[in-house]
Amino acid sequence: MAGHSKWANIKHRKAAQDSKRAKVWTKILKEITVAAKVGGGEPDTNPRLRTAVIAAKNANIPNDTVTRAIKKGTGELEGVNYEEVVYEAYGPFGVALMIEVLTDNKQRTVAEIRHLLSKYGGNLGENGSVSWNFTRKGNIIVSAENTDEDALMLTALDAGAEDVVNEGETFSVLTEPSAFNDVHESLREHYNIEHADIEMMPGTTVTIGNEEDADKYMKLLDILEDHDDVQKVWDNSEIPEDIMEKLNA
């Protein structure tokens, strides 16, 4: 989801994804395989793989399943050859989208993504058309319950974080991607981490302030994220909390 201040929206989408555990597992394992192929099978020396393994642990994927996915990436076991693609697109209401894909058939996937976008009033963009507005950042969401902000700030900054943002019910710990794993490791022993990922955060946002429009837009995001080849969707939408509560009711 767009922006580190949108954890309420992320939780809505995450709950929907968690209800489809088999599909969530498939996507995480696919990422582990590609990460191992690109950077090697040792999480300690491969930050991308380490991040994916953290996601696997959070999703309760068995260790032996994770190990098999790593071996498929390193070539120790036979596996599918996936291609990484990031599609830049526009959704309805002028929202910018970054759609991260792992596919074994690029032509099929781009045709399907284009169809889904057009069905909901969106379209694919050229390379660079929306990526200029996004910056890759580590984002670790810590529950504010029983959490001392000053202590969290000190621990996070000492571990290499850039900033800690008070979001009310949660704190958002922001990092450079290269520091994400170290910061996460330092925090997870002492704090209740609700979410941790390396995200594409927008510089500017588009507010969708109408409930009907927000519902239409959320349906597009849900159907994109449900696609087998789509790993993640980042956007620059901003939906007011009261409208999100109505949609989630």
Image (cartoon, rainbow, N blue to C red):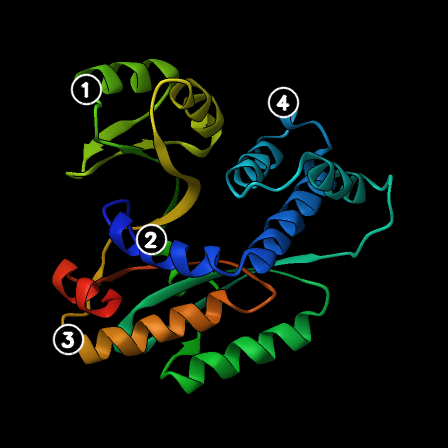
Give the CA distance from mark 1 to mark 3.
Answer: 37 Å
**Among the two numbered marks 2 and 1 on one chain, the one whose residue lies closer to the N terminus:** 2
Which structural element holds mark 3?
loop
Mark earlier in primary sequence (1, 4): 4
Q: Which mark is residue 187?
A: none
Dot label at residue 210: 3
Query: What residue is disc 4 on?
Result: 44
Q: Position of residue 48 (x, y in %)?
A: 58, 36
Say whether disc 1 or disc 3 marks the residue closer to the N-terminus: 1
Disc 1 to disc 4, how far (Cα)?
30 Å
**Residue 21, picture quadrant:** bottom right
- Cα separation, mark 4 vs mark 2, equals 28 Å
Q: Which residue is mark 2?
A: 10
**Is residue 40 at all visible to an observer of this figure?**
yes
- Residue occupying image coordinates x 36% and y 84%: 121
Q: Which is in the foreground here, disc 4 or disc 2?
A: 2
- Could you classify mark 2 by the number of other residues whose Cα lies within 10 Å: few (under 14), some (14-19), or many (20 or more)? some
Mark 2 secondary-structure assignment: helix
Q: Amino acid at mark 4?
A: Asp
Amino acid type, residue under disc 1 in the picture: Asp
